[in-house]
Image (spheres, rainbow, N blue to C red):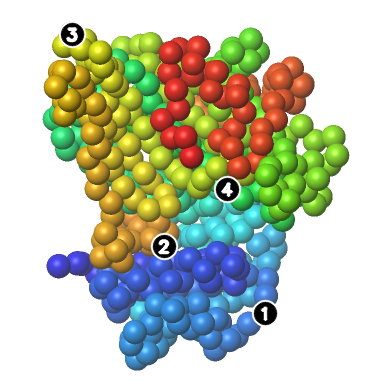
């Protein structure tokens, strides 16, 4: 039995693509499930001039593929209103404040306000400042701010943004969205770790040989060169998504499964992450750029539209992370992400140490591997040792597996739905906090400094492969190999 959540959400960027594709359908799903009933309101705002009826039609169009009952959809849409607004103009916040207060009165919502920033990051601090100075925050209930990544472009810019936000909101009121943390199989990491004593007891240096996180894409830069050439795989995928997944894998066991204790446990790991110097960046990280492939459609990165001819941007990153913790002493955490690779997949592979018992056979026990497949379809795979069917007592590896069923997939909340719901409930477990963001930036900034100064090799790799040979050699230096071969 679900309980009604009383809240008012203001969507900045309310006519944008994200709002139409993800945000309004997510709120509609919460309505259909009963979390939102009578006492909620949605106020959209953007520069575009629309009246309420035009905005409601925009919402109607955005949820049409999720509508089974038109009367239900119309009842939902009645909770929406809109005001055109310039976020840089302090005076225009009076118009928005009036709309928010009208909606709060109409639907009997006492406080409980969420402000969702689906706008360019350069406006985050400005909006936060004016929400406070112009009196848009509620005097009762809660005030919460949801912001989309990126959270800055470096540690310094992230710290500046944090300072701007904290002038209006406490850090526990800030909900930094990394939609990977809303994915069902990322959340399964905690269930597997802490819900199974067999893994809980073995989640340490005594049993784990290495940890691997792979985020591979088959597409190239497409039409994003303007942004991507300034970010590359390092900033686009490693600093945020990959580091947040690593947080769940490396964290200490929390005292309880509350957001406060989960964040404390993650931060104990993040604070122990080793920051590399120039020599260590070259030893533990590989950067590369895709070249041509077997297909004529696979252009080298340097021949893609709007890519500078002399670009040294990384379209592939592989590296080794180290945590100065007793739990992880000597255990490398390998990460890699790249474009134009052999297969699209986001996955975690936990490689356990091979058994030491000697069967006296030609084939001894191999390393067991627990794999969590996050995308494109969720699955959990476990590779174990068992006896082969031969006369001699040899071992072989067997595969145990589970794949998310179509029925489960149909019932799984979308990441944005889950994260909006968690914000309404004040649950920050699956959001990045400032400490984690700041450590991730310090770690990545040290690598970026080496690359900006061009003091590291820039490898090339064949489009349609799993990256450069240097990536394989990185692991081979420790006697390891990538589990996922594409």
> Residue, x 55% and y 64% (percent of image)?
18
**x and y percentages locating residue 483 in the rendered image:** 41, 30
Which residue was labeled with disc 2?
Answer: 113
Marked residue nearer the N-terminal end (4 or 3): 4
Asked if residue 170 shows in the view, the reply is no
Q: Nearer the viewer, mark 4 or mark 2?
A: 4
**x and y percentages locating residue 54 in the rendered image:** 58, 86
Quick check: 43 above or below 165? below
> Residue, x 65% and y 41% (percent of image)?
463
Residue 360, labelled with which disc? Answer: 3
Marked residue nearer the N-terminal end (1 or 3): 1
Which residue was labeled with disc 4?
Answer: 218
Mark 1 crowdedness (10 Å alpha carbons): few <14, some 14-19, many ≥20: few
- Front-most of 396 and 110? 396
Quarter assignment of residue 229:
top right
Mark 3 vs mark 2, CA separation in Å: 67 Å
Report the side of 448 relative to 163 (left or right). Answer: right
- Front-most of 177 and 475? 475
Q: Secondary structure at mark 2?
A: strand
Report the side of 407 relative to 219 (left or right). Answer: left
> Residue, x 20% and y 34% (percent of image)?
194
Which residue was labeled with disc 1?
Answer: 49
Report the side of 111 relative to 130 (left or right). Answer: left
Quarter assignment of residue 462:
top right
Mark 4 crowdedness (10 Å alpha carbons): few <14, some 14-19, many ≥20: some
Q: Secondary structure at mark 4?
A: loop
Q: Nearer the viewer, mark 4 or mark 3?
A: 3
Q: Nearer the viewer, mark 1 or mark 3?
A: 3
Mark 2 crowdedness (10 Å alpha carbons): few <14, some 14-19, many ≥20: many
Quick check: 35 above or below 202? below
Mark 1 vs mark 3, CA separation in Å: 78 Å
């Amino acid at each position: 039995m679900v309980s009604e959540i009383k809240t008012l959400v203001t969507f900045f960027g309310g006519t944008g693509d994200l709002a139409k594709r993800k945000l309004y359908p997510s709120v509609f799903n919460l309505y259909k499930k009963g979390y939102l009933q009578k006492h909620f309101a949605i106020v959209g705002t953007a520069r575009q001039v629309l009246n309420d009826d035009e905005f409601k039609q925009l919402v109607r169009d955005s949820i049409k593929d999720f509508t089974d009952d038109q009367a239900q959809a119309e009842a939902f849409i009645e909770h929406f209103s809109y005001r055109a607004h310039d976020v840089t103009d302090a005076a225009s916040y009076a118009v928005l404040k009036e709309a928010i207060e009208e909606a709060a009165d109409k639907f009997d919502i006492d406080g409980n306000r969420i402000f969702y920033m689906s706008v360019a990051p350069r406006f985050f601090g400005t909006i936060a400042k004016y929400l406070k100075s112009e009196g848009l925050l509620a005097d009762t209930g809660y005030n919460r701010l949801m912001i989309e990544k990126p959270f800055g472009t470096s540690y310094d810019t992230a710290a500046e943004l944090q300072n701007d936000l904290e002038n209006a909101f406490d850090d526990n009121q800030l909900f930094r969205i990394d939609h990977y943390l809303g994915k069902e199989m990322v959340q399964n990491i905690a269930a597997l770790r802490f819900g199974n004593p067999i893994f809980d007891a073995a989640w340490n240096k005594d049993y784990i040989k290495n940890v691997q996180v792979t985020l591979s894409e088959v597409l190239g830069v497409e039409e994003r060169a303007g942004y991507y050439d300034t970010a590359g795989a390092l900033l686009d995928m490693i600093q945020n998504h990959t580091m947040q997944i690593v947080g769940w894998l490396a964290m200490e066991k929390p005292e309880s499964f509350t957001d406060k204790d989960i964040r404390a446990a993650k931060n104990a790991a993040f604070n122990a992450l080793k920051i590399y110097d120039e020599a260590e960046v070259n030893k533990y990280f590989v950067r590369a750029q895709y070249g041509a492939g077997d297909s004529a459609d696979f252009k080298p990165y340097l021949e893609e539209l709007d890519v500078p001819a002399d670009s040294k941007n990384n379209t592939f990153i592989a590296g080794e992370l180290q945590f100065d913790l007793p739990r992880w002493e000597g255990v490398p955490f390998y990460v890699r992400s790249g474009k134009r690779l052999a297969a699209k997949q986001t996955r975690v592979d936990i490689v356990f140490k091979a058994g030491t018992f000697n069967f006296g056979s030609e084939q001894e026990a191999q390393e067991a591997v627990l794999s969590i497949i996050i995308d494109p379809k969720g699955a959990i795979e476990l590779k174990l040792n068992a006896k082969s069917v031969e006369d001699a007592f040899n071992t072989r590896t067997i595969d145990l597996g589970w794949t998310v069923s179509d029925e489960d997939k149909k019932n799984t909340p979308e990441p944005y739905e889950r994260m909006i719901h968690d914000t309404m409930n004040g649950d920050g477990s699956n959001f990045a906090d400032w400490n984690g963001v700041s450590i991730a930036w310090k770690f990545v900034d040290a690598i970026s400094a080496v690359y900006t100064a061009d003091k590291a090799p820039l490898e090339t790799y064949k489009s349609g492969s799993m990256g450069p040979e240097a990536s394989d050699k990185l692991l081979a230096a420790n006697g390891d190999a990538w589990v996922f071969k594409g």
